[in-house]
Image: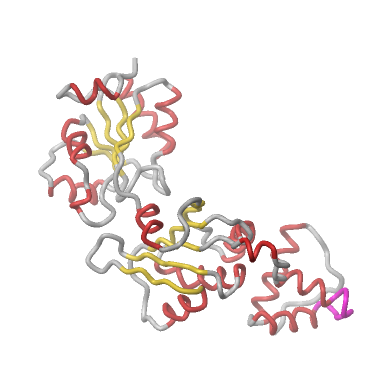
Amino acid sequence: MPTSREDEFQTTTLAPGLYIVATPIGNLEDITLRALRVLRQADLIACEDTRHTQKLLNHFEIKIPTQSYHEHNEAARARELVERVAAGERVALVSDAGMPGISDPGERVIRAAVERGLNVVAIPGPSALVTALVASGLPTETFRFVGFLPARSGERRSVLESLASVPETLVFYEAPHRIADMLHDVENVFGPDRRIVIARELTKVHEEFVRGSVSEVLAEFGRRDAARGEMTVIVAGKSKIQQAQSPKRNLVERIHELMTSESLAEKDALKQAAREFGLSKSEAYREWQRKKQATGTRARGTAKQPQ
């Protein structure tokens, strides 16, 4: 039978169960006393990267066996870990940083343990999305966590287009080598004036918040040699004033308009729309083709890719 939280606090020995333990996202001082107690009393610590977690354990002199649990072995390891919990063991689940299951492995084993009726306990602690959001200066009353966007530009733009009109503050994670591409797509889809904040190296020595409009932040990162550190990106939702205004035409809508209202051939409409949106002809062509493939529609004309 699952134990109550009262039982857990009153006993010196940890009850059997799966413990989801948040670990520091940078500064080791952010670990909680409760997290340390759970890690010290666990029978096994399942971690995303055993080498990374071992540095944390060594720092706090915790000598508990570890086992890898990551996206490549998640299915098999989830079954193993659930069986160990069912047999009466205490298994602590950690990721490299922050809360397991939030853009990190963990969801599968947690769901399996819940379905088996086993004791599942979350140990709260550091989270990059909350840390970045509350310090961003953007509205926090309602927000939507998106996590990582697709790596491919076409897929990334499709997701952004689905979010362009939502009023909630949006929270993303992004890798440093993709941040410039992401910002270009955010600018093209949301417009250059949308407010954005990029939080970099949170809780570490070189923690930084870059705030401004999308165009200003994009220009700032364009001046840098290379982006470093994991990024949390906070984008303001569409304001009530913006919601009340006529929505800004996107590239595809503009091409359709030029072809229908001004009777331009597809190739000429592509060239003119590309100029208006500040895109190369090849970028406009790829976006146009992506949208046609996604909707299954055919446009008048048979334009070839611009040279």
- Quarter the C terminus occupies: bottom right
Determine whether, in the image, residue 169 is placed left or right of residue 239: left
Q: Nearer the viewer, residue 178 or 213?
A: 213
Measuring from the top left, give residue 120's x and y in whole percent: 35, 28
Q: Is residue 167 above or below residue 206?
A: above
Q: How many marks?
A: 0
Does the magenta run of residues contain 45?
no
Which image quadrant is residue 201 in?
A: bottom left
Q: Nearer the viewer, residue 79 or 140?
A: 140
Task: Identify the residue at the far top of this view.
Answer: 1
Measuring from the top left, give residue 217's x and y in whole percent: 45, 75
Q: Which residues are magenta?
A: 259-266
Measuring from the top left, give residue 71's x and y in whole percent: 41, 45
Q: Residue at x 24, y 51 (%)?
A: 52
Which image quadrant is residue 184 in?
A: bottom right
Measuring from the top left, give residue 101's x and y in whole percent: 40, 42
Q: Nearer the viewer, residue 77 or 5?
A: 5
Determine whether, in the image, residue 251 is placed left or right of residue 175: right
